[in-house]
Image: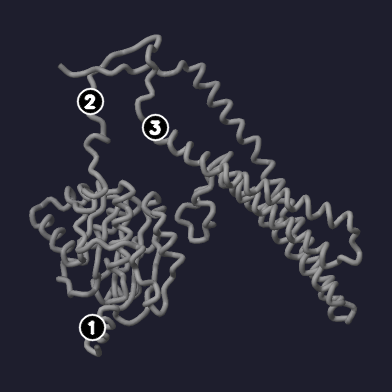
Amino acid sequence: MPTVQPISRDPSPTTTTLGYALFATRWLQAPLYFGLVAAQGVYVYKFFNELWALILRCVTGQATENYVMLAVLKLVDVVMIANLLIMVIVGGYETFVSRIGLQGHRDQPEWLSHVNSNVLKVKLATAIVGISSVHLLQMFVDVHHTSRHALLWGTVIHMAFIASAAILAYMSGPMAAQSERVGQHAHQAHIPEEPATKVFVPAQATARDDEPSAEERVRAAGFPARKLLEEFDSEHPRSFDREAVARLGKLDFVAARRNVVFVGPPGTGKTHLAVGLGVRACQAGHSVRFATAAEWAARLAGARDAGRLAEELDALDEHAVLIVDEVGYTPFEAGTAPLFFQLVAHRYERGSLIVTSDRPLGRWDEIFGGPSALAMVDRLAHHAELVRIDGDSYRMRRATSAWAE
């Protein structure tokens, strides 16, 4: 006999409406952030005003060494306060008002990807300590015009800022861990022991019961070998955008359904990076499929010949990431280009593609030819992170080194 589980009734419409109304009041904070934007403009004006005064004094020969040092410290002070303002504006709005939707943006600040109220408070505290340090340094540089009383209290206040920031950083660790534990348990059994009104339904297996483990996802992905991003020799390529790969490692591109294209000569680590991203996506709970371009061509051609190409493309939608390796390494038949175009067009804004190739996208007409090559590149590159890797073959370097020994 199937077990049963109680399910509480939904909240009343009145309670829901009141809650939504209270939640909507967060938009009252929006004008406050625009006010801070205006304050940011004031500091921009102050910065250039101070800079112009410094330049004039230097040009006319009226600037002493102490004056230049104090003026530069004032400029640094203005910049640090402006940084504090932008952190409050962007981080505060994102945390307390509404998502800005910067995921996947190439200029997304590093701190914004993991911002929350605890992180924001620690960032602000450290920024305040930095500003206080600059103020205290100004006082010591101009010590002949600063009273001992002011120096003493400036030092005491600065140490108080340091102590409070250290305490806040120490406390934020346990608070973050606690909130993570709460988040993990929030979706589990949260049914009251004795609800007022219960409806009993047969218990069913949840998606979590049937969900494969990370190791099972890695095995099912079909990787040629398990490679991790941390194992990549980033010192080998002559030219390599490490920041782009670090940003991709956060997997924001998967949630945004964006593509990744690694371009470079053979042996520079394109496949390693593609597999590393795929393994990390599997560990994050995403389904991934890996195959070379020739293998994808054979798979799609077989589905086309069997009259089920549309069904095959729909079936691939269950995978958040498809990896197409070695595009351009082997020649394709004339009918392959339309198949790849259909794959890219079908995945467009539906799921992520990770592609490796030895030729830039502008030369893909050499690989596929025909009018579909341009249309395929247009869709692939529209929402894509393009990573160029230049260097000698890592495998040839190892082989040459072994031969020399």
Identify residue for label 3: 185
Q: What residue type is labelled 2?
A: Gln
Taking 83 as reference, is 172 left or right?
Answer: left
Residue at disc 1, secondary structure: helix
Taking 14 as reference, is 259 left or right?
Answer: left
In the displayed orientation, state which residue is furthest to the top.
196
Identify residue for label 1: 399
Name the residue rendered at 13%, 50% in the picture.
Answer: 308
Please identify the quarter of the rendering in which residue 382 is found.
bottom left
Measure the C-alpha gap from mark 1 to mark 3.
52 Å
Please identify the quarter of the rendering in which residue 245 is found.
bottom left
* Mark 2 or mark 3, whichever is nearer to me: 3
Measure the C-alpha gap from mark 2 to mark 3.
19 Å
- Within 10 Å of disc 1 (Cα), the crowding (few <14, some 14-19, many 20+) is few
Q: Which amino acid does label 1 sit on?
A: Ala
Residue 276: x and y in percent read: 31, 61
Q: Which of marks 1 and 2 is nearer the N terminus?
A: 2
Identify residue for label 2: 204
Quick check: 190 above or below 285? above
- Within 10 Å of disc 2 (Cα), the crowding (few <14, some 14-19, many 20+) is few
Residue 23: x and y in percent read: 56, 29
Residue at disc 2, secondary structure: loop
Residue 132: x and y in percent read: 74, 55
Name the residue rendered at 18%, 50% in the picture.
Answer: 310
